């Protein structure tokens, strides 16, 4: 059985701050070094022969 309870003002404030921080991080651009790494990985993936475990 799920127990319902009121969220305290402190818990509400914590929740709001966590959401704000997460939103800020989610909006940041991906660093160039990660973009370059992804390009290298995609290139390596397409140039390597596929292996099959049939």
Image: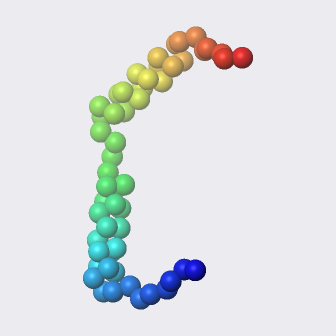
Q: Which of 42 and 19 is in front in this view?
A: 19
Image quarter hosting the N terminus: bottom right
* Picture layout, residue 26 above or below residue 13: above
Residue 8 lies in what quarter of the image?
bottom left
Give the vertical position of 17 relative to 29 (above or below). Answer: below
Q: Kindly identify the residue that appears in the image at 33 percent across and 46 percent down.
A: 29
Residue 12: x percent and y percent? 34, 80
Between 4 and 46, the one nearer to me in the picture: 4
Please state if 54 lies on the left or on the right of 44 as rendered.
Answer: right
Image position, residue 6 (x, y; %)? 41, 88
What residue is rendered at 54% in x and 80% in y? 2
Vertical placement of 24 versus 34: above or below? below
Residue 8 or 21: which is nearer the viewer?
8
Q: Which residue lies furthest to the bottom in this view?
A: 6
* Residue situated furthest front in the rendering: 1
In the rendered image of this protein, does residue 11 appear above or below residue 54?
Answer: below
Q: Quadrant of residue 25?
A: bottom left
Q: Position of residue 10 (x, y in %)?
A: 27, 82
């Amino acid at each position: 059985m799920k127990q319902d309870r009121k969220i305290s003002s402190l818990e509400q404030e914590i929740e709001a701050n966590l959401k704000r921080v997460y939103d800020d991080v989610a909006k940041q651009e991906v660093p160039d070094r990660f973009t370059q790494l992804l390009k290298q990985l995609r290139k390596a993936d397409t140039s390597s022969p596929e292996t099959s475990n049939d």
